[in-house]
Image: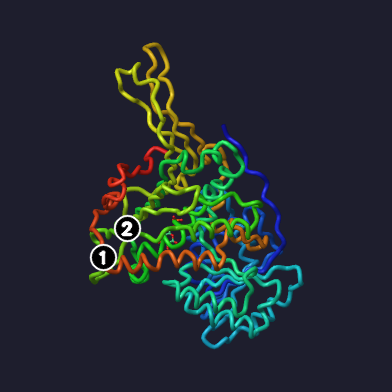
Amino acid sequence: MSASLPPTASLPPSDYIIIGGTGDLSLRKIFPAFFWRYLDSQLTDEYRLFATSRATLSVAKFAEKLRPFCESAFADGHATADKWESFLKIIQIVNLDLSNGDGATSLAAQIARKQSTDRPTIYYLAIAPSLFGSAVLMLKAAGLATEQARLVVEKPLGNSGESSRKINGELATVFAEHQIYRIDHYLGKETVQNLMALRFANVIFESLWDNSHVDHVQITVAETVGVGGRASYYDQYGAIRDMVQNHLLQLVCLVAMEPPARFNADQVRDEKLRVLRALRPLEADALLLGQYEDYTDELGTSSTTETFVAMRLAIDNWRWAGVPFYIRTGKKLRQRASEIIITFKDRPHDIFSNSQDGKILGQPNRLIIRLQPSEGLRLQLTSKQPGPGGMRLFPSDLNLSFDETFEERLPDAYERLLMDTARGNQTLFMRVDEVLAAWEFIDPILALAKARTPVSYKAGSMGPTGDLLQADGRSWIDPHEDW
Ligand code: BG6
């Protein structure tokens, strides 16, 4: 069965100012996302996209750098040379030197040309967090931190609770919390949002979503890539800071949170915060660290930074008491796949065992939420094998693949999040108290990790298994190959 995506909602024309606009994040993620939204007519010729750069650069030169990152739009026939040319017309490159504020006055003058009180002005800091403080002060000094201004920032928002408080504190000296959009791009993924629809727009799951019915939850975010060119950055962070503090904990929150009374930014974030605050401090035996075999060769020096981490989390509240949440993530694993698997409790009594020579076939019900690639949902049930021959059972799947259901391309996380900043909707962005609560949970884990040497694992494996689950009589469920 195939279906069409609903028409794209139109948004108020806005000004985006990408500070660090010619850097890696901007070229790889931000401008390609703008281009896709332009192709979809959500971003119109009324928009203005400013990319700030320390070096003088023409739009034509910028376009040359950007084009390889937009190639997929041409390859599948969405983009044409005309569309590309008209897209480039809404881009302006502005000279700006953050170290001394040179260029800020002329940026302000350019923005002022079209400014009106109802036109959102969105500043995206695509620069190192150590420069956030000076960037917001510069915006303030140039009179750009106005009422309708919004600020977009991205992780790493610090490498510990203390440094995160410092960075967030610097932002708060100039912008109010309702103006700050902290991106965690996992929250922009289609299936991650669908998890909320699944839980809160259907009754059948919500009534089973607790410790009376759920045995345990597994979350796997597996990557095949290594750290490559990011080795020196990555070595300072490791998988706990790079993936768990943000993406994986956000996934845990969305699975575990209580239904908010309304689907609005503050109520959703209040509920996520409650989950973070209910996380039990991690016990030493609930942490497993790994490092892929050739990591230190890539880095060129010895290191005990983890490229794989697994944890057994406990959520101390009435809904989840006694239900372990096992999470793991790693680089250079066998396959790129991210899945959330809810395993329900087994049948209390098996009425079919006699008809199968005492063998219990079938398995506990599982709900598998596949985040990537090939987004979709699968509900594993036990059914009767068709045909004569008695009551024989076999595992069967109810399968909803978004790729197959929707013929059109689904927008990627950055596209959705960028458009939410124009819309002024903070639901999918992290509030400061969430970020700090996540650090509060992570800081002691970093102290545990510091005293450990990660277990070496082979590239192309699923990382070290350890006995996190075995000790509980369970095992990891590897992501499906045949999704
Ligand atoms: C980033 C991490 O936040 O997420 C990277 O810094 C990681 O190390 C990436 O590779 C994974 O994102 P995705 O969308 O490819 O799963």
Q: Secondary structure at mark 2?
A: strand
**Left/right of residue 1 with respect to residue 455 in the rendered view:** right
Q: Position of residue 75 (x, y in %)?
A: 50, 50
Residue 64, labelled with which disc? none
Q: Is residue 298 visible?
A: yes
> Residue 21 location, x and y as percent?
54, 72
Q: Is residue 74 visible?
A: no
Q: Is residue 395 shown above or below 354?
A: below
Q: Amino acid at mark 2?
A: Leu
Q: Position of residue 82 (x, y in %)?
A: 62, 57
Up-down: is 463 above or below 381?
below
Point out the tag, 1 or 2, that comes first from the N-terminus: 2
Task: Tell me the quarter of the image containing the C terminus.
Answer: top left
- Cα distance, mark 1 to mark 2? 10 Å
Residue pushed farthest top? Answer: 388
Name the residue carrying label 1.
452
Labels 1 and 2 touching (C-beta < 8 A)? yes
Q: Residue at x 48, y 67 (%)?
A: 155
Q: What's the residue type where badge 1 is placed?
A: Arg
Front one among 363 and 159: 363
For the residue labelled by badge 1, is the local secondary structure a helix, a strand or a loop? loop
Q: Is mark 1 within 8 Å of ligand 1?
A: no
Give the colouring mode of the picture. Answer: rainbow
Residue assigned mark 2: 287
Quadrant where the N terminus is found in the figure:
top right
Q: Position of residue 16 (x, y in %)?
A: 63, 69
The residue under the point 62% across, 80% down is: 139
